Amino acid sequence: MWLLGAASAAPHAHSGPPFPIVTERTVGPYRLSVWADPDATDDGSAAGQFWVVLAPAQASAALPADTRADVFIQARDRAASVSSRRAEPVNGSVGRQFAALLMDHEGPYAVRVSIQGGAGAASVEADVEATYDLRPPRFMLAVYLMPFLLIGWLWTKLLIRRRHRVITTRPAS
């Protein structure tokens, strides 16, 4: 029973691909989704990544080319200033925009996305829990694969040795 209690505390941690924090919400003239990969870092790199997916609220309308999103974050668990960054279009598409911000510690953050453009202005708020990226460094892949590669090499060597014995022990006809 205590295992279930321990497992239920784990969903707040994040290690993996981005996940939606706002899904298909209509705000003003826009329908938007916000995806987050809230990784905290100690080295000062901007690892808190946010993707803003925009579409016009009315299917018959088009998204103006000057539409821009600004992403703001603020730590909820301590006094901290608001960090912000203008999201840049991904592959030149204003419908998909990306911003990376510094999340300097683990904990809850308030996220606000403000949109301005020819269709008007809108804003949406959400919360995320920043955690340290728990994925191992890439060089550790070699360390983790080493036992399997060693077993494969030994197995192949054994098969070759067996085949060589079978060929050399066959009687000549």
Image: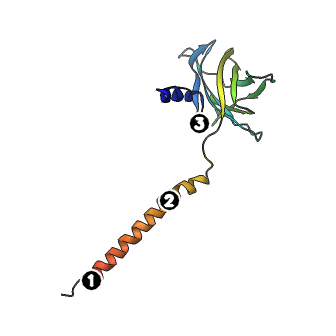
Q: Find residue 95 and report its horizontal and vertical position in percent.
A: 61, 27
Report if residue 94 is visible in the image: no
Q: Residues within 10 Å of mark 3 (few under 14, many from 20)?
A: some
Percent coordinates x, y for residue 158 in the rendering = 38, 71
**Mark 2: secondary structure:** helix
Q: Which amino acid does label 3 sit on?
A: Ser
Residue placed under numbered mark 3 in the picture: 15
What coloring was used for the rendering? rainbow
| Residue under pointer 2 | 147
What residue is drawn where x is 72% and y is 38%? 41
Q: In this view, does 170 lie above or below 20?
A: below
Please indicate whether residue 167 sits to the left or right of residue 40 in the image.
left
Q: In which quarter of the image is residue 132?
A: top right
Q: Which of marks 3 and 1 is nearer the N terminus?
A: 3
Question: Quick one: label 2, few (<14), some, or many (20+) residues within 10 Å?
Answer: few
Query: Where residue 105 appears, x then y in whole percent?
Result: 73, 32
Q: Tell me the number on the disc at residue 169.
A: 1
Q: Quadrant of residue 151?
A: bottom left
